[in-house]
Image (cartoon, rainbow, N blue to C red):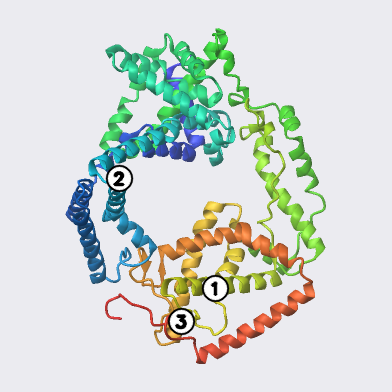
Amino acid sequence: MKSRKELKKNARNNLKKHYLIFIVTCVIAAFIGTEFTSSFSIVENKILPESIISEQQKVDQAVKDALKGETAKSKKATKKIKEEIIEKDKKNQDKVFGRSRGVFAMIINAFSTGTIYVNFIAGMNSIIGHPNITSVILIGCSLLVSFLIWMFFINMYQALSRRIFLEGRIYKRVPMQRFLFLLRTKTWLRTSWTMFVTSAFYSLWCLTIVGIVIKRYSYMLVPYIIAENPKIKTLDAINLSRKMMDGHKWECFKLELSYIGWIILGTVTFGITEVLYSNPYRVAALTEYYVSLRKLAKKQEMPGIEKLNDVYLYETAPQNVLEEEYKDVINALNKSKSNLEKPKGLKRILADCFGISLADTKEKEKEEQEEIKQERLEIYKNIIQGKEYPMRLFTISEKHQRKRLDTLNYTRRYSIWSLIAIFFTAAIIGWLFEVTLHIIEQGEFVKRGVLQGPWLPIYGYGCILILTVLYKFRKKPVKEFFLIIILCGIVEYCTGVYLEHTFNGTRWWDYSGYFLNIHGRVCAEGLLVFGLGGIILVYMLAPLIDNLLKRVNPKKLIVICCILLSLFIFDHIYSHYYPNEGKGITDIELIVKGR
């Protein structure tokens, strides 16, 4: 067995290598309540403003009245709370956190005013006919939902987190996709059941004075055992943990006690030092301790230890083994390197920086397909080089899953004519979307937009900018999503300013009163829609449209694009002097004071 000093040294080194993912793993655990919940004491101790406390008390009373069967009284109370919120919102008309208009505001008000709870309880009362029975049913459903969330998410998360720490000991990279480990191996339900039984056993032992402490250490290794072998039988995992900890409980207690200084520091700093360092440090040290006990159990040939057989969780696989298991990837990787010629000059700048191809030839398509294949294969390089855990060598092997390489062509470069066609497609779809929305809301047809034609160019410009300016971020969907929101926000805000200055302050849209709006020109609700729509565009719609366009005769496509461009330019010139205005277009209901 290694000394505590050695365990802690190794733990610090592992934390240094994987600081971000270890921090994220422990923060999630603290957030959902698996462990380290005291780390969020700074949030729990936050003092709310008196106005919010008063509002919450009114909501609580309304819900209590609804449970008593006083439906009319509770609905009247929630309606009054909502009216007060909207009235305050109108008095402070330029604030960012608007709550009088929009879907976001409606959702937030429904929960914050208690309307959604009161209406649900009222509906239950009307069906059942007795408020007491309704209360019993709601309490029962609440307990059931809470239990299911605890069993299938909170309680089992500890095993998932231990897998991440175990891989971090040996490998230089632990991808975020490892959070899907139990789903990929189809062991989520089994893990949840094993952790549930373990918790049940410990709860029963807690009825005895000795069991509270002793059995805590007896069952401490169960999450690690499951992390290594998620298909191990429940009782086998529990018994193996008990045997491995036999004679080492006091030793483990002293290891935990040695962190008393960090715990005190965490209390003084309201949990900040725990979140940023000591929580993952302690887990990393306990992980080292488990590895030492596992090694000792293997040496002693402990009964049941053969079930812990994930060899490559503790050592990197030999290169020849990796090459044999991933030979299809290596072969594809080598083939994809053949005779790729990069464009030069302006063509290369447009291609590499903006994903624009000046021509749409068969040679370009062939080259692009090979490049895409190469990019998709890059994700396997870390595994082949021994930097990442080889999932194909896992004891519950992915051999049964498909090994076919994903060749989804979302990193493609678009030709000029494809971009023009995508621009008009987006502009027309955007126009149809807003016209349809107005029909649904107001029950009448209104031709939307400043132009006379059936298109809203802001949608088209947004799509083209997303596909070109953000070309280099397509391999990082999360970053792409947030950059799309920022880019679309800038485009919409600047377009709004331009139209107002060009047409003497006339507005074609106004988000005043929407939750999280900026001067009524952009709002969080719209930007979220743009972000989601942009992701769908990049990874699905644009490649699909481009594939369809490739079936069209190139000469016919060029003619169609030129005709559309000519009509669009003419519409711009004409609408500059005679913009599309009138009912449902520019007579927007303004709630901003002074307008």
Judging by the rendered image, the residue that carries numbered circle 2 is 128
For the residue labelled by badge 3, is the local secondary structure a helix, a strand or a loop? Answer: helix
Amino acid at the residue labelled 1 = Leu
258 left or right, relative to 422: left
Pointers 1 and 3 in contact (C-beta within 8 Å): no
Judging by the rendered image, the residue that carries numbered circle 1 is 432
Residue 584 found in image quarter: bottom left
Frontmost of labels 1 and 2 is 2
Residue 425 image offset from top left, x and y in percent:
62, 71
120 left or right, relative to 281: left
Residue 387 image offset from top left, x and y in percent:
62, 35
Amino acid at the residue labelled 3 = Leu
Judging by the rendered image, the residue that carries numbered circle 3 is 499
Residue 74 image offset from top left, x and y in percent:
21, 54
Earlier-in-chain disc, 1 versus 2: 2
Residue 81 shows in this picture: yes
In the image, residue 186 above or below residue 294: below
Locate the C terminus and report the quarter of the image it occupies. Answer: bottom left
Measured in 3D between alpha carbons, the distance from the residue under mark 1 to the one under mark 3, in whole angstroms, is 21 Å
In the image, residue 210 above or below residue 485: above
Earlier-in-chain disc, 3 versus 2: 2
